[in-house]
Image (cartoon, grey):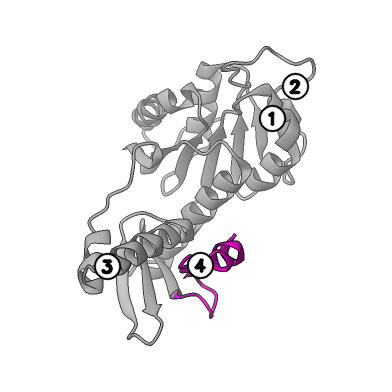
Amino acid sequence: MAELARERGKKVLTYGEDENADYRITRVRARGFTTEFTLRTAGGEPIDGTVAVPGRHNVLNAAAAVAVADELGHDLDVAVEGIADFAGAARRFELKGEGNGVGVYDSYAHHPTEIEADLRATRAALESFTRDSEEDIPLGRVVALFQPHLYSRTRIFAEEFAAALSLADEVVVMEVYAAREDPEPGVTGELITSKVSHGRVWYVSGREEAVRRAAALAHPGDIVLTMGAGDVTELGPRIVAALAEAAEGDGTGREQG
């Protein structure tokens, strides 16, 4: 597309981590749920910036926004500073609450590449907490609760979904959210769980079971991430409540069973 645009006399600018990018990202480092980066323009001095959301994909988005601001004549330093004030969008790694030392977040991710990006970002955030802590704390785990969206998408991308979800330590897959489609014989959440590469995976058919399972799997220091374009977004607060109730019930800070 870039070459075609150039052939037609259009100005083309590139951004990314490639050494030939016009706006080149030269360093990405997770700091909890913020991400630090360095951006270099052609012939320019490197500028350090921060985005208040996790993940390399968000740094790429930030670089694109800064590039547009720069090309429109705005001060590059001011643009980078402005990026730091962006707190994220609803349903894009949105905090739903915390219970029993477990953070519960929600994401609209419903495609394998989105799921992979979110899980890698979550892992990097947890690793940074352990790396940067002054105390010897164990590495938290990632508990993924995924609701497939559409029967056709589940059937087509079952293997890709399973590969992406395998990045989580614990995986819970719900029944397919039909949306505009009619059910397809043989297409359920089990189509995905059967292909996940590790054994820490569960298929649940109901919402209540999904809440109970996710809460039971999470330990203090872990992160639960609900993912999908359907009504899974409603389960985050209920998981938070279940975590808090379990901690009060046994007095150990962890649900048993």
Which residue was labeled with disc 2? 187
The label on residue 154 is 1
Foreground label between 4 and 1: 4
Magenta span dominant secondary structure: loop
Q: CA distance from mark 2 to mark 3?
A: 46 Å
Q: Residue furthest top?
A: 182
Which residue was labeled with disc 4? 9
Expressed as whole percent of the image width and height from the top left, the position of residue 170 reads: 59, 41
Q: CA distance from mark 1 to mark 2?
A: 7 Å
From this viewpoint, is residue 256 visible?
Answer: no
Q: Earlier in the sequence, mark 2 or mark 4?
A: 4
Q: CA distance from mark 1 to mark 3?
A: 39 Å
From this viewpoint, is residue 114 visible?
Answer: yes
Q: Name the residue nearer the viewer: 244 or 37.
A: 37
Query: Disc 4 marks which amino acid?
Result: Gly
Q: Residue furthest front?
A: 8
Does residue 186 lie above or below 52 as drawn?
A: above
Expressed as whole percent of the image width and height from the top left, the position of residue 137 reads: 41, 61
Magenta-colored stretch includes residue 13: yes
- Badge 4 crowding class, 10 Å Cα cut-off, few under 14, some 14 to 19, many 20 or more, is few
